[in-house]
Image (tube, rainbow, N blue to C red):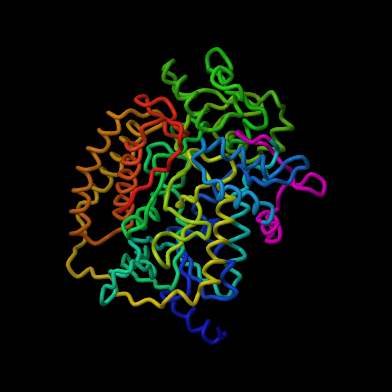
Amino acid sequence: MSQETLEIGLNDPHTSDILIIGSGAAGLTAALNLADHFRVTVLAKGKLDEGSTAWAQGGIAAVLEPGDTFESHIQDTMIAGAGLNDLATVEFVVENAPKAIARLTELGVPFNMDGNAPHLTREGGHSHRRIVHVDDATGHAVQVALQTAAEAHPNIRLLPDMVCVDLATSKHEERYSGAGHVWGVYAVNRETGRVELFTARATILATGGAGRTYLFSTAPRGATGDGIAMAWRAGARVSNMEMMQFHPTCLYNLDVKNFLITEAVRGEGGHLLLPDSGYRFMPDFDERAELAPRDIVARAIDHEIKRLGLDYVHLDISHRGADFINEHFPNIKEKLLGLGIDMTKEPIPVVPAQHYTCGGIVIDLDGRTDLPGLYAAGECSESGLHGANRLASNSLLECFVFGEACARHITEHWDDLPPPRIRPWDESRVADSDEEVVIKQNWTEIRRFMWNYVGIVRTTKRLERAQHRIRMLTDEVNDYYGHFRVTPDLIELRNLLQIAELIVRSALHRKESRGLHYTLDYPDMLPEAIDTVLVP
């Protein structure tokens, strides 16, 4: 490809070789691995750094400590995932972890060091110290390094404030072929309020998770499951959507509702205590106590809160001393001090909150979805890595490994990807809405009934109630969508409702309790671990 061809393509942001939706770890990793050979456009829903990557406090899991092994990391991942993981995927990701850390180091990520080696911490579910980190703000450091490199590359165009509506597929051709090929996306430009068509021969979804389906979540405001919903509507399968991870320790604060207290606080010796008595209750639930996997810890906290009528429990690491806390958790300490909590002297009030979407778009080891031309990586995908529960600090790792995998497969199979032939967006028969209150009301209702009926502990009756509400709201939202010009809020509402439907349908399908899916009607785990795969 000549430099002249590259320059012509980059002059038109609506046409590129590869389109990447999402500007976090997965999307930017893919972009940087493609840009030396192709024209790449990256769309961000808001600002480039507003996704989940920049929010990650903990770190990245990799076998780097003497005495640790790939086999141990693989086993820890499989145990946390309650056997629902795909072994080949787990092996693939774990074995590529040290290389990913090396590449991030080359990009300038300033990992904490212990002499000449990275400083390693330990988190729940891990049998060794294998978490590389940048203080307690690893995700921010990773985002800065990747974004700086992407902004400096002449073949990468980064476009913020583009809210994707739907994938541009074969049905949008002048003559519908029925092949199901994906050739880009339709997106609302926040600045103009109009829908624009972005085309490419390959499209990568790196849109993050669906945490905002729930009332309480540690996810950023934009985590509304857009990529999963768009892929589903286009005809891709999704899997294990019932496996929604709740982080055990979100700060309990009525003004700050989504501040995560990293897993590493428990990994470094923090204790979970009942507020009044100071009783340490985790040993009553699991022999690993605070180091048990997140689903076990979240259910234990939920049990104690409901049993005693509490608003929160305490997480206390003050016994480790001020010097230790200042060294390991400086950002968390400063944030809490601003809220009147000194974690060096007193416990932190915490509650569980939705944290990670373990299910998603079905992909293979190359990041390919069911649809030709469409790839996915990161939290929007279901690669088989996490199974029924994500092991701590495997999430950023998955982004790097599969971002590169997508790039590698596209590069190797470029000649198999035909050029797009897509029609522009048609909004000739719609009007501007004068009933925005409908969107706000329905958004709040979805998140509330999902929290109450489809949360940490479930029952069939609760799920059926949620399903009934979803059906009613779907008719209302579809009617609204068909008559009014699309807006970012309407797009997100439509996607949230689609995600809620997929979660509830998947949860009703699983007649057992496994990992993150715990139901009082089927409390036992079946002998065989089987994925819940939904087909459009």
Which residue is at a point 58% across and 47% down the rendered structure image?
Answer: 90
- Total labels drawn: 0
349 left or right of 495? right
Q: Which image quarter: residue 354? A: top left
Residue extending farthest front: 527
Horizontal and vertical percent position of residue 487: 30, 58
Asked whether 16 or 530 is in front, the reply is 530
* Up/down of 8 relative to 118, above or below: below
59 left or right of 232? right
Horizontal and vertical percent position of residue 73: 65, 41
* First to last magenta residue range: 100-127
Task: Verify whether residue 385 appears in magenta.
Answer: no
Horizontal and vertical percent position of residue 22: 47, 59
* Up/down of 117 relative to 243, above or below: below
Residue extending farthest top: 277
* Up/down of 122 relative to 6, above or below: above
